[in-house]
């Protein structure tokens, strides 16, 4: 046995001692006794029994446990979730969120294709209630075209009207197409194209007294509604309207059935009203007067009471049908009058089109939009993706989980300034950019003025009207006669006392105090 | 009795019992007997007897119910997770009842996300059971109770400071024993050394210009060159294909074949280097007292901090928050954009320092106060924490390794090893029970049981990585590069709600409101 010289000096004695200790057990005791007495163990060496065996366990990984057997196998990836092995968790998540946001913008390619074929501007469109790939469109030259969205080809062309086609709808059994036009007619067309190549004729034509501006079909029954000078309810099997509704004098520009509470119907009139009807009743239900005209309304397909109105004042108002005294949400981002609005089937989002040549998607509960694209009044229909960076088609399981993970991260870090900036950033056309700036300036100016007025007046003399109530002028609960209405409009000065009277009778619920001056 | 009944009968009788209120799918034999007796009595048409038996049976049912109540499954429900483990995996505390002033929807969302976090922590804690490896250890066992001793019992006389490397190599398997080796390189020393992040490769750099890299497990040489210049330090970058070498004049980068990739002239006379793998930053301390950060993904100098403290040759990185600690006469912590002693090392929340006063001191980084103090033979000139918290200190030619040195005052080292030559550098190999020592006569690799983390996470660092996996991991990690601005003392700050700013803003708003109100009242005449 040799003495190792690679051990520290101050343990030397002990090591020397212990080495010989083991020797002692086997060989001559007297030969080593001299050494034993000469070399004393260090104080922390407990006893002679210390010469012990050792048991050692060293990390020794068998590569077979960590490598795949053949190259056709997948790699083995052992995991250990110990947080110390995963440092900078928050920072890395933040970076991932930032990257996901950037990639979302990079892959934002919303344009899918154009449906080319109309020879004049497209005036109206309609979805097919059952077939997802079918779209109907009517143009200003009186043509109606049926499109196959999958192949992006026109399947059928109908020379429907003289002048504009104002509205198209399909009955719920998908047997008929109903169109209205400037030529004061409602035309009923078979769903299947005519066998021969000859000019297609309508199955049925109803000639009205005035121009029909819009048409919509009931979601269950064989009933449809048209509007023009009044709202008419039609039975598909009859040539005369089943019922007609009027409230006010001016013409009505759009009518929409509620998809859930199928007997409810909303229309918007040229004189700034939104009127609600029940098909089972003789008179209209409720009326709402906004500060400016509403172009269209759209019902939420998931929440029966909710509808959104596209207004001329560049904003959209989401209302609860049961509480019309204030809007649930005011959606503002457009810089010109909003022309049309439609809900997504999920009821979580809606899309709007505006005179500022932009299309925006708003979440139903948020006032700000994501801008998707810019259109023009060219003679084609364009198809866009609702979420611009989404991949079309079926996703791989792993792909899906990655998308879910990155969406969650974006949601988690949505309020971090960098993430928010990148997510919101869009290159908009110059006109929209400038207009946005001007509108912002106008708003701040108005706000400043109001604050100044409030500061220089008696406290609470100028009421604070929330934005959700600002645009609402009057909420009507019951039908007023034409005379009353005239009285109200022409002699607006008496509205206060008159309103009080009506209020007492429970007819008129609320009049916006700010809007008195506008009468 | 049971044997006389046919299979069909038995089934019928069982169905009958199952129909009853107390349904037991694992019926006991007594119950079975009882039911069979019912069957038999039915066969004979003895209605009276049947009624009696039915009554008896109902009693029996009650009694079995009671028995079940008494003999409840001792391991009912999912296995419990110990609170300590839960604490290890949890991401902060619950909000509790501090949810006032929030909407119902908000409260619901918060509650739900908290539940999800708790579930994640619980599942992570449970997954510990699946970890394939155990940490290494060394035990001294008295010969008397050698037979019944297992690794789990740490008995009397577990002092291990006098266990020799030869004893360890004798008692371990051949593969592990091969990890203990010496390289005699007596021409170009003393040597500096560095392991790659996954612990597979080793770079050795002799002061006289000898530079070599090899797979230290298989002893396969990658390259061996002489840079014909003094080398002060060597550092692997994020993968094993690139390394930074601090030479006499400038900083150079080499690939895994020894080809010079870059010469970074903006970083001159570098003494120590440290690489921040998640930030892709190479921190270098220079001879003239500057701390420089080089972004290796872009090749740009990100920051240079002139510490005005003179020669900087003591440097350590806190792996949990990427803060660089420099040693002068007191320790200074340097963040990327904003803290002397001789050597220092960091583990978890502890910092070990050693000075020429022949002591090793352990500091708590939360309070910046010393916790322990150890006297060593000479002043330790190199200190290093292992992944599992073993602290190795090299003083001249002796390495002392301490176990649990941070929390408990140790009177003896865990292991001691003495070399023939003075030590110039030492490092624990990640994910292995190996301590590498660079000295003036080459390199020696020691076995230190219990130093390395036994279970790696393959998605983080994988010692068994293939070339393709490495390439993919490199791209992924580059995509997730953390910006240098995010280096803070508390790395989780970014995932938290900034209450301070919010409160300040609320306060400002309140003041403004009060101001407006007062102005309003002052102006109004009434």
Image (cartoon, coloured by chain):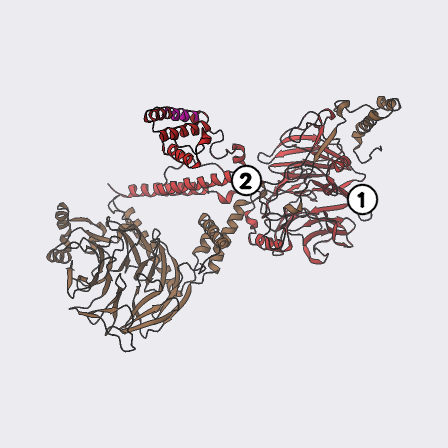
Where is residue B521? Give x, y as percent.
Answer: 29, 41
As drawn, the chain in brown is: A
The crowd level at tag 2 (other Cα within 10 Å; few <14, some 14-19, many 20+) is few
Residue under pointer 2:
B127
Q: Name the residue under label 1.
A: B441
Magenta stretch prevailing secondary structure: helix
Q: What's the magenta region?
A: B58-67
Of all residues, the one furthest to the left in this rendering is: A483
Residue B6, given in percent of the width and then of the height, sits at: 44, 35
Disc on res. A270 = none
Give percent across and percent down for residue A23: 83, 27
Taking the image as drawn, is residue B302 in sight? yes
Mark 2 vs mark 1, foreground winner is 2
Name the image quarter holding the N terminus of chain A: top right
Say above or below: A280 vs A432.
above
Using the image, name the chain to which the residue with label 2 belongs: B
Tell me if residue B62 is in the magenta stretch: yes
**SS at mark 2 in the image:** helix
């Amino acid at each position: 046995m040799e003495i190792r010289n690679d051990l520290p000096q101050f343990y030397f004695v002990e090591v020397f001692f212990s080495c010989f200790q083991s020797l002692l057990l086997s060989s001559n005791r007297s030969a080593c006794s001299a050494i034993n007495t000469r070399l004393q163990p260090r104080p922390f060496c407990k006893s002679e029994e210390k010469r012990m065996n050792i048991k050692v366990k060293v990390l020794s990984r068998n590569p077979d446990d960590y490598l795949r057997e053949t190259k056709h196998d997948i790699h083995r990836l052992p995991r250990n979730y110990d947080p110390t092995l995963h440092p900078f968790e928050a920072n890395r998540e933040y970076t991932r969120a930032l990257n996901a946001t950037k990639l979302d913008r990079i892959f934002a390619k919303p344009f899918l294709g154009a449906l080319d074929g109309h020879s004049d501007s497209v005036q109206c469109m309609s979805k097919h209630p059952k077939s997802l790939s079918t779209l109907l469109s009517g143009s200003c030259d009186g043509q109606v075209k049926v499109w196959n969205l999958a192949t992006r080809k026109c399947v059928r062309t109908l020379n429907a009207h003289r002048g504009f086609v104002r509205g198209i709808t399909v009955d719920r059994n998908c047997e008929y197409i109903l169109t209205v036009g400037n030529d004061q007619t409602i035309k009923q067309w078979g769903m299947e194209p005519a066998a021969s190549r000859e000019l297609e004729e309508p199955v049925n034509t109803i000639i009205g007294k005035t121009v029909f501006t819009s048409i919509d079909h009931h979601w269950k029954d064989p009933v449809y509604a048209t509007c023009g000078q009044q709202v008419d309810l039609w039975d598909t099997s009859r040539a005369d309207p089943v019922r007609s509704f009027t409230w006010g004098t001016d013409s009505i520009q759009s009518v929409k059935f509620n998809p859930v509470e199928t007997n409810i119907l909303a229309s918007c009139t040229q004189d700034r009203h939104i009127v609600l009807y029940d098909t089972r009743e003789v008179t209209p239900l409720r009326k709402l007067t906004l500060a400016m005209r509403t172009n269209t309304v759209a019902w939420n397909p998931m929440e029966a009471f909710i509808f959104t109105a596209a207004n001329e004042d560049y904003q959209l108002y989401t209302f609860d049908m049961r509480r019309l005294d204030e809007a649930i949400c005011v959606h503002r981002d457009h810089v010109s009058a909003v022309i049309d609005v439609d809900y997504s089937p999920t009821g979580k989002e809606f899309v709007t089109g505006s005179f500022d040549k932009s299309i925006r998607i708003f979440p139903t509960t948020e006032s700000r939009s994501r801008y998707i694209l810019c259109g023009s009044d060219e003679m084609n229909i364009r198809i866009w993706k609702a979420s611009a960076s989404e991949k079309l088609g079926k996703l791989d399981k792993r792909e899906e989980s990655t998308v879910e993970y990155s969406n969650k991260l974006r949601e988690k870090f949505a309020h971090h300034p960098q993430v928010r900036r990148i997510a919101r950033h869009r290159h908009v056309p110059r006109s929209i950019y400038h207009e946005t700036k001007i509108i912002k300036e106008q708003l701040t100016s108005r706000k400043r003025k109001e604050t100044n007025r409030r500061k220089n007046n008696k406290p609470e003399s100028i009421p604070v009207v929330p934005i959700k109530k600002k645009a609402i002028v009057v909420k009507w609960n019951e039908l007023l006669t034409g005379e009353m209405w005239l009285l109200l409009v022409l002699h607006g000065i008496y509205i206060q006392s008159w309103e009080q009277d009506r209020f007492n009778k429970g007819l008129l619920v609320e009049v916006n105090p700010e809007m008195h001056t506008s009468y | 009795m049971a044997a006389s009944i046919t299979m069909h009968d038995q089934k019928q009788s069982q169905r009958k019992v199952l129909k009853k209120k107390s349904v037991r799918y694992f019926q006991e034999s007594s119950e079975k007997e009882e039911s069979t007796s019912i069957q038999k009595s039915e066969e004979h048409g003895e209605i009276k007897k049947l009624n009696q038996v039915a009554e008896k049976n109902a009693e029996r049912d009650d009694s079995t119910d009671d028995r079940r109540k008494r003999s409840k499954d001792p391991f009912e429900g999912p296995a419990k997770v110990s609170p300590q483990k839960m604490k290890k995996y949890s991401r902060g505390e619950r909000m509790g009842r501090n949810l006032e002033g929030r909407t119902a929807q908000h409260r619901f969302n918060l509650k739900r996300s908290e539940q999800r976090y708790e579930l994640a922590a619980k599942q992570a804690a449970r997954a510990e059971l699946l970890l394939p490896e155990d940490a290494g250890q060394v035990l001294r066992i008295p010969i008397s109770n050698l037979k019944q001793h297992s690794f789990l019992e740490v008995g009397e006389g577990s002092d291990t400071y006098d266990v020799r490397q030869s004893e360890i190599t004798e008692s371990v398997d051949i593969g592990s024993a091969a990890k203990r080796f010496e390289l005699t390189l007596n021409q170009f020393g003393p040597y500096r050394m560095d392991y790659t992040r996954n612990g597979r490769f080793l770079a050795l750099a002799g002061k006289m210009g000898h530079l070599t890299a090899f797979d230290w497990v298989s002893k396969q040489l990658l390259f061996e060159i002489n840079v014909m210049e003094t080398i002060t330090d060597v550092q692997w970058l994020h993968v094993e294909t690139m390394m930074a070498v601090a030479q006499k004049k400038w900083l150079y980068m080499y690939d895994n074949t020894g080809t010079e990739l870059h010469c970074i002239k903006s970083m001159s006379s570098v003494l120590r280097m440290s690489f921040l793998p998640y930030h892709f930053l190479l921190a270098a301390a220079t001879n003239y007292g500057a701390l420089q950060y080089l972004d290796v993904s872009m090749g740009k100098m990100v920051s240079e901090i002139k510490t005005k403290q003179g020669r900087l040759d003591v440097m350590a990185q806190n792996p949990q928050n990427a803060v660089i600690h420099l040693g002068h006469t007191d320790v200074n912590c340097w963040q990327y954009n904003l803290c002397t002693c001789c050597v220092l090392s960091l583990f978890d929340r502890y910092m070990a320092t050693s000075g020429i006063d022949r002591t090793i001191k352990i500091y708590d980084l939360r309070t910046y106060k010393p916790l322990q103090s150890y006297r060593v033979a000479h002043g330790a000139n190199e200190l290093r924490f292992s992944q599992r918290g073993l602290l190795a200190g090299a003083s001249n030619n002796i390495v002392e390794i301490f176990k649990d040195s941070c929390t408990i005052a140790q009177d003896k080292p865990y292991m001691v090893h003495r070399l023939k030559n003075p030590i110039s550098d030492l490092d624990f190999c990640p994910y292995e029970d190996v301590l590498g020592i660079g000295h003036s006569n080459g390199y020696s690799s020691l076995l230190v049981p219990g130093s390395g983390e036994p279970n790696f996470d393959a998605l983080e660092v994988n010692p068994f990585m293939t070339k393709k996996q490495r390439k993919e991991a490199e791209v992924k990690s580059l995509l997730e590069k953390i910006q240098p601005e995010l280096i803070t003392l508390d790395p989780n700050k970014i995932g938290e709600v900034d209450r301070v700013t919010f409160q300040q803003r609320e306060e400002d708003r309140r003041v403004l409101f009060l101001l407006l109100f007062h102005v309003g009242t002052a102006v109004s005449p009434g």
